[in-house]
Image: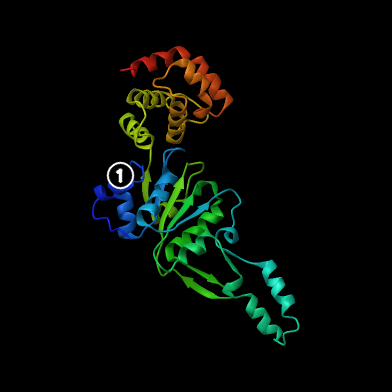
Amino acid sequence: MPIFDSTQAIQASFAKHNYIADDKLATALRLVMALQKPLLVEGPAGVGKTASAKVLADVLGTKLIRLQCYEGLDTSTALYEWNYPKQMLHIRLTENSGESLKDREAAIFSEEFLLRRPLLEAISQLDKPPVLLIDEIDRADEEFEAFLLELLGEFQVTIPELGTLKAKNRPYVILTSNRIRELSDALRRRCLYLWQAYPSFDKEVSIIQTHLPDINEQLARQIAGFMQHLRDMHFNKVPGVAESLDWAQALVSLHQGKLDMTIIEATLGTILKDQEDWDLFHSQQKTLEHVLQTYES
């Protein structure tokens, strides 16, 4: 596993995996590894928050364990469950084995019958620390957030039938949030913090060229400039970097060397995913044509 002694080393390693990490992200990730504290990354959808955790796991050569949060997520789904069908089968198969009922009950509550969900899996890794991605924590309920706070403090879990399981290798933890709801002060204090905004024009051009090395430079600049303008409009679903890359790939596959309103209209579904947003786009067509001209050279 590489040891990063500088932010530049992290940036270089991420660049090899087609991820442009700025100084703030690289510094935050360096501190995650040095201080062994979770990192809370907030920002709009589609700016690469989730991807940064995936690339970190690739760079470190370790396992990525992802917990996708949603409303109603409970601790059993996130932590562990008992394999009930397997337990019942074992009981039936050992009915005439001569074992006592107590021994048979003890057997079915052993690790053989334990289903490790993401959080327990993350603290059970023995060879090297994994990257634990807790994705969209703002979608989970406050009760789950409170449970998570306790887990992130101790990195241990008590299972009544097995005792306390403590992490031998503390995972590197990345939490992401799109700010659907406000997170508690207690969780924020537990974590390092990073706000990941939409990229600047120059950075977005670099991202597009990194992912599509053969793209026409003028087209890359037009895409980045056009997207910068779209993000200033009041769309219901603002297009992120993911949409920029989808759009760029679509245009390259259609052998387009530059943008015009005809091809934008034909490929609009790669960047805008809401009917009201389409209507708003069409209402601003004259302005958008002028934006295109700005990035023609």
Q: Nearer the viewer, residue 58 or 274?
A: 58
Which quadrant is the C terminus positioned in?
top left
- As drawn, is 226 to the left or to the right of 117? left
Badge 1: how crowded within 10 Å, few (<14), some, or many (20+)? few
Which quadrant is the N terminus positioned in?
bottom left
Query: Under tag 1, what secondary structure?
Result: helix
The percent position of residue 227, horizontal first and vertical second, equals 41, 26
Q: Amino acid at mark 1?
A: Lys
Whether residue 172 is situated above or below residue 227 in the rendered picture: below
- As drawn, is 102 to the left or to the right of 265? right
Mark 1 sits on what residue? 24
Q: Residue at x 42, y 34 (%)?
A: 241
Whether residue 167 is situated above or below residue 62 in the rendered picture: below
- As drawn, is 105 to the left or to the right of 165? right
Q: Residue at x 59, y 58 (%)?
A: 77
Q: Residue at x 68, y 72 (%)?
A: 87
Q: Residue at x 45, y 12 (%)?
A: 286
Q: Nearer the viewer, residue 245 or 136?
A: 245
Q: Nearer the viewer, residue 2 or 199?
A: 2
Count of labels shown? Answer: 1
The percent position of residue 35, horizontal first and vertical second, equals 32, 59
